Amino acid sequence: MLTRQFERPISTSFKQDKHSGCHVIGVDIGGTNLRLALADKSGAILGRWSRSTTGARNENVIVELIREGFNALLAEASLPRNTVAAVAAGAPGITDTDQGIVVATSYLMGWRDVPLRALLEAALGVPVSIDNDVNLAALGEAHSGVAQGVDDFVFLGIGTGIGAGIVINGQLHRGCIWSAGEVGYMLVPGTSEALVDRGTPGPLEEIVGGQGIRFQWQSRWSERLTPLPQDAIATEIFDHALAGNALAQEVVQLAGRTLAYAIYNISLILNSPLFVLGGTVGMHPALGDAARKVLSQLGERVQPKLVASALGPDAQLRGAVFLAVETARNNLAPARG
């Protein structure tokens, strides 16, 4: 499953001897953290490396950090550079996987038309594939998580913002301009109808995303209503909702109802039987329970199964490793004709 989407030919300048390249590296580029994993060709992770990206916005800084992590992983494992057959990286934004260009990232990074694949290949000297980070999370869940054996499902990554990785007939669906899954911009009841630019929080994110939940909390907060501080983060608000705090429950119910509407609408179009909730906000049981309750009231014909990610924060990194393995396999395949 999920092997047909890797059809882009790898540059012949990186063709390797069949005896070299026994390892791959997966990269997860986040707005606050950068994570790398060294793995063998079976996808088993052998080493990890991470750094904070808080305040780092320039793509060249990120590339240099990736090179630092690349070298550190090899040094720690006492491996030569030619042992790495491929690298795959996930970026938080719209990504042209054919050209290797990050078209636009979220407001956390603000990239526009960054030739990430070319920059990484020049820095690392190995074949590189890139994709949207939520797409890679979907690959991770399909390969070694809760969506194994499922040909049609949607992965919803809910953290600071919201993105979807859509799998149809065992293949990632990216759309004609690579923006399939940008569900943070959906209009559902109760969200703002004001037009927003790409790279800024969308209407759905303003209610269901981590930053939006904080805003909803702050707009309702009163010292006499709750002991929780006004600057509480989304997961803290959810914890207090489960503990019975009425104000926190109000915020969670709004987020859960709005998320349920979005899932209902997506399910009507795609008829996906499974929705996987990932991300620090999406995996919290308070949000999942609130959304399931609303979905159960919307009708029996549309009742997708709603589950939490089995891989948690590792979903993107596992997906990146899987993509790197596929990239290495394609790179070593005999040329046709």
Image (cartoon, helix red, strand yellow):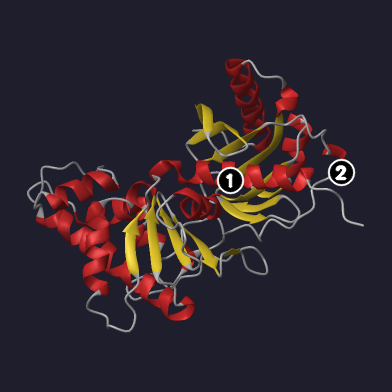
The residue sitting at the right extreme is 337
Q: Residue 170 placed where, x, y %?
A: 56, 65
Q: Residue 133 placed where, x, y %?
A: 54, 49
Mark 2 residue element: helix
Give the number of marks. Answer: 2
Q: Residue 77 placed where, x, y %?
A: 59, 18
- On screen, 169 above or below 233? below
In this view of the protein, can residue 55 be seen by the observer? no
Q: What type is the residue that disc 2 sits on?
A: Thr
Question: Residue at coordinates 58% horizontally, 16% vertically from top-left?
Answer: 76
Asked which quadrant contains residue 258, the reply is: bottom left
Label 1 crowd (10 A; few <14 / some 14-19 / many >=20): many
Question: Residue at coordinates 22% horizontally, 63% vertically from top-left?
Answer: 290
The quarter of the picture where the N terminus appears is: bottom right
Question: Residue at coordinates 61% horizontally, 64% vertically from top-left?
Answer: 174
Question: Residue at coordinates 38% horizontally, 74% vertically from top-left?
Answer: 188
* Mark 2–mark 1 distance (CA, rounded to whole Å): 21 Å
Residue beneath disc 2: 12
- On screen, 56 above or below 300? above
Q: Is residue 121 left or right of residue 236?
A: right
Q: Is residue 228 left or right of residue 291?
A: left
- Which callout, 2 or 1, points at the residue further toward the start of the chain? 2
Label 2 crowd (10 A; few <14 / some 14-19 / many >=20): few
Residue beneath disc 1: 322
Q: Is residue 231 left or right of residue 17?
A: left
| Label drawn at residue 256 | none
Give whichever of 250, 20 is nearer the camera: 20
Q: Residue 148 placed where, x, y %?
A: 45, 56
Q: What type is the residue that disc 1 sits on?
A: Phe
In this view of the protein, can residue 51 be seen by the observer? yes
Mark 1 residue element: helix
